[in-house]
Image: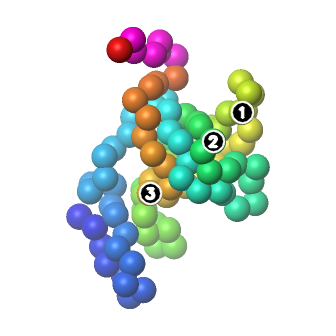
Amino acid sequence: MARLYETGILIPSIKTMKQAELFQWVELKQDVLDSLVKQGDRGVIVDHLQPTKTQKEAGYTIEVFKNGETLDLISVPISWVTLLPEFWGKPKAVI
């Protein structure tokens, strides 16, 4: 269930958003401060993060790639990414 905090912002919980799988590809919806990671960069989920007292939204640790090389390892809220249908190590589906 989503939670409404005193700021008036509705924070989705991990139960209300689609749960991603490990090694699923994602695309970042926004730039990540203090990182080379920018909106539109793609990465692979390497860990699921539960909400904490300071970070109310669940998140993912993501290894972000650019030109086949690791750009950065970041942790972001789940609302910052778009889940993609591909998985690392699996061939892309032919449509």
In the picture, measured across the screen, residue 2 lies left or right of residue 41, that is: left
Give the residues drawn in magenta, as a range.
89-94
Judged left or right of residue 29, residue 1 is left
Query: Residue type at mark 3?
Result: Ser
**Residue occupying image coordinates x 43% and y 69%:** 56
Numbered label attached to residue 79:
3
Pointer 2 residue: 41
Looking at marks 3 and 1 on the same chain, the residue that comes earlier in the sequence is marked by 1
Q: Residues within 10 Å of mark 2 (few under 14, many from 20)?
A: some
Q: Which mark is residue 66?
A: 1
Inspect the image, locate mark 1, and give the three-letter code of the amino acid beneath it.
Answer: Lys
CA–CA distance in space, label 3 to label 1: 21 Å
Residue nearest the viewer, comparing 39 with 9: 39
Q: Earlier in the sequence, mark 2 or mark 3?
A: 2
x and y percentages locating residue 45 in the rendered image: 51, 38
Instruction: Name which of mark 2 and mark 1 comes first in the sequence.
Output: 2
